[in-house]
Amino acid sequence: MVTVLQILVRNLSASPQYFHVFQKQARFPSLHGAAIRSNCLGCRQIGNYNHGGGEIAFLLDPRVHAGALSSLPVPAPLYGSEAVAPPLSRSIPSLSTASRPLMLAANPPKNLLPLSLDPLAFGPPSHIEGLEEGMFAIAVPRFTPMPGPQLLCGVGVMASDGSMLLSSAVTPAPNRILTCHAEPVYYVRLGYQPGGGALTYDISHAAECDFRAGATTFTVTYNSDGTFSSEGM
C-alpha cells in the first residue's frame, strides 16, 4: 500500500497569500554540468489560519517515478509509398508525457527504464549494475536533437488529477544512459507560480520538508513576521 506524503500549509499573516511547492533538485551525474529545469508541483492561495481555519494540503506520491516530456515531431503514417499527415497536424502544438514508478527497494533494484519515442512510453524496468542507492537510469533511444529542449527526461511526480509533472528534468543526449538521483525533500515558498511551470530554483526563504527520516506529514507555518517554520510527524 502506498502511503501518501502530505504537506499542510498554514498562513498566520494578516492577508491571503499564495504558496507553491517544489522538490529538491535532482542530480544527473551522467550529464554533469547540464542545465536542470525545476518545475512547480502545486500552488494555492490561503487566508489567515486563526481567522478561518483554512489550510492547504499538498499530497505527494512517495514512489520514485521516471518522467519524460516530448514535443518532437510525430512521423506521419504511411499510405502506399508516401507519408500523409492530417492537414491540422502542422499547426497544432502538442506535448506527450510518460511516467512510470520504479522498484528501487527490490532485490536487486529495478533501476533501469527503456524509453521509446514513437509513441512516448517507458518499457518494463530492469536492473543495471553500478548505480548508487536511490539512483535510477533511463535508456534514451536515438533521436535527432533540434533547437530548443524538445525532449525532457527526469523525475516524474503524479498530480492529483492523474497527470504527470516533471519535478526536475534535463535535455538528454541521444542513444545514452541518463542517470538520475532524486530525494523526497520538498520546499514551500511564498508567491504565485503556475503548477507544472518552470521556476527559478531557490531554496532561500523557504520551508524545508525532508521526508527521508520517515515522516509522512509536515506542517508548514508562515508566521506573521514573514518567516517559515515546519514540523514533521
Image (cartoon, helix red, strand yellow):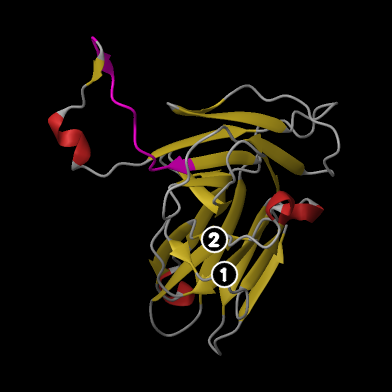
Residue type pointed to by label 2: Ser
Spot the residue most to the front. 81
Residue 65's quadrant in the figure? top right
In the image, residue 78 lies at what x, y percent? 28, 16
Q: Which residue is mark 2?
A: 38
**Residue occupying image coordinates x 51% and y 41%:** 68
SS at mark 1 in the image: loop
SS at mark 2 in the image: strand
In the image, residue 223 lies at what x, y percent? 56, 82
Q: Is residue 1 visible?
A: no
Q: Which residue is mark 1?
A: 201
Q: Residues within 10 Å of mark 1 (few under 14, many from 20)?
A: some
Say which quadrant the N terminus sits in.
top right
Residue type pointed to by label 1: Tyr
Give the main secondary structure, helix, strand or loop, of the magenta stretch: loop
Residue 104's quadrant in the figure? top right
Residue 137 relative to residue 133: left or right: left
| Label drawn at residue 1 | none
Tell me the distance, in whole angstroms, between the alpha carbons under discs 2 and 1: 6 Å
Q: Is residue 71 magenta?
A: yes
Using the image, determine if residue 7 lies above or below residue 30: below
In the image, residue 158 lies at what x, y percent? 51, 42
Q: Are marks 2 and 1 in contact (CB under 8 Å)?
A: yes
Residue 233 relative to residue 16: left or right: right
Q: Residues within 10 Å of mark 2 (few under 14, many from 20)?
A: many
**Residue occupying image coordinates x 39% and y 82%:** 15
Spot the residue most to the left. 87
Using the image, determine if residue 217 lies above or below residue 49: above
- Nearer-the-camera pick, 59 or 175: 175
Residue 92's quadrant in the figure? top left
Q: Which residues are magenta?
A: 69-80
Q: Is residue 221 visible?
A: yes
